[in-house]
Amino acid sequence: MSKTITIEPVTRIEGHAKVTLRLDDAGNVARARLHVNEFRGFEKFCEGRMFYEMPLITERICGICPVSHHLVSAKACDEILGIEPPRPARLLRELMHMGQIIQSHSMHFFELAGPDLILGFDADPSIRNVAGLYEANRGLTLKAIALRKYGQEIIERLGERRIHPEFAVPGGVTRALSVGNRDAMLAGVETMIGHAQEGLAIMKSWMEEHAEDMDVFASFPSNYLGMVSEDNAVTLYEGALRMVDPQRHPLERFDGHQYLDHIAERVEDWSYLKFPYHRKLGWPGGVYRVGPLGRLNTAEKISTPLAQKEFELFHRLGKGKTVEGSLYYHQARLIENLYAIERAHQLLEEPDILSTDIRTIARPSKREGVGVIEAPRGTLWHHYWVDEQGRLEKINLIVATGNNNYAMSRAVEEVARHYVHGEPVKEGALNRIEAAIRAYDPCLSCSTHAVGQMPLLVQVLGPDGSLLCQVART
């Protein structure tokens, strides 16, 4: 008899989701779905606000990656003004963005994904968390905390707050960087590089010990999208967008401001989160992945020396093609973490970083503006349409996690079919399904802009749709 298993809530992610598994008569998975059950509303209630309020409003979408929304919103506002901020302001914005990347990537690997990798997918759930990680390896946990703290301190030294800073404004930034703050940030660089390299060493060792998992765990072909520089190097603050196919052949390179010509969104009745895809390739052939794995598959190099060495090792795994397994997101994330620390070092040594030429004042000259940035979780768009006074008439946000919606759903199904066979369904198998979602480090609050609780529900349905059992977490 068929049955349905429900996992709710999905844990160690930001936001609300559940997974339903429909089993056939033999107890194998016939269908699996990730349901994002938050309501999307931020775009609508911002209508009528003045455009220059948006960098402070939209960063309230999330407390995990507020800086990404803060900066991309300011970039959209720059376009409405019709100006480019002074170079020192762009350097300072990028520096804050590196702080965001460091704190977010460090937290995800060590505190959200780390318990699965270091303690084991089948470890007792009561210890499979950051507290258990601390008991197992206190030294490593303290280094992980120090890494995240370093990223947060970059944000705070620039924006006076670790969360929801007041820094980027249309036309530039609000304050210059002091010598004292620059020197304090520089003083921690070498130590943080060492911590990041230690995390990478742990991940690569785990990969060697679990080679089969790396190859079969939610491994499937897709297109990839990421921001690149003129010479196709990874870049996270500004650049063109590049898409490659599973063979790593270039499909298209385009200006992210023209995204509506290239990206469409699909709606399914079982999720509040939309499904973006590439217009020319259609649905579902045009689905793509973003984030660390997307960016490293899309780019041809990294511009900092230590991260470039890791990038070369990473691409050997693909043997000329893209690296497909979802667990490789963790390795890619750690390589980007190393890059962000190195890039912060480069920015702090720029002579212009201490300049007081940090803002251009102008009046609105355009009726719309688009901002594009690579948030920790992937490509992020803010698009604003305004009236002649600069009042918002329409808003469109495509958030990083939304770009990965299809991939997360596919990952859930791939892992469920591989690890769930008959009853009883082991807790470790359900955790692996959650881990498939966690690999993408989703921020569902960002992508759906919801207010509410964070439940995770996994339901198992029979072939006839009847509810056989469910597991719920509140």
Image (tube, rainbow, N blue to C red):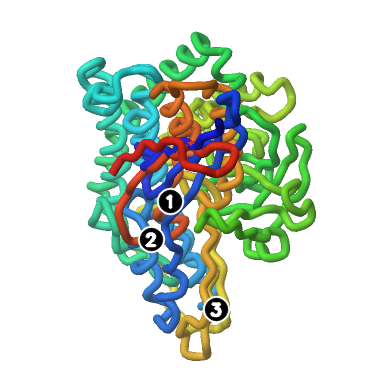
In which quadrant of the rendered image does the C terminus lie?
A: top left
Q: In whole angstroms, how far apart are the C-alphas of marks 1 and 2?
A: 8 Å
Where does label 2 land, which residue?
450
- Residue 342: tell me if it is visible: no
Q: In whole angstroms, how far apart are the C-alphas of marks 3 and 1?
A: 25 Å
Where does label 3 land, which residue?
385
Q: In whole angstroms, how far apart are the C-alphas of marks 3 and 2?
A: 22 Å
Q: Residue at x 44, y 73 (%)?
A: 360
Q: Is residue 405 left or right of residue 125?
A: right
Where does label 1 land, which residue?
444
In primary-sequence order, the first of circles 3 and 1 is: 3
Q: In this view, does 27 lie to the left or right of 69?
A: right
- 327 vs 16, nearest the viewer: 16
Q: Are marks 1 and 2 in contact (CB under 8 Å)?
A: yes
Location of residue 253 with respect to 110 vertically, above or below: below
Q: Where is residue 62 in the image (x, y as percent from the top left)?
A: 35, 56
Instruction: Inspect the image, locate mark 3, and give the three-letter code of the amino acid beneath it.
Output: Trp
Disc nearest the viewer among 3 and 2: 2
Q: Position of residue 336 (x, y in %)?
A: 49, 35
Q: What element carries label 1?
A: helix
Instruction: Inspect the image, locate mark 1, and give the three-letter code of the amino acid beneath it.
Output: Leu
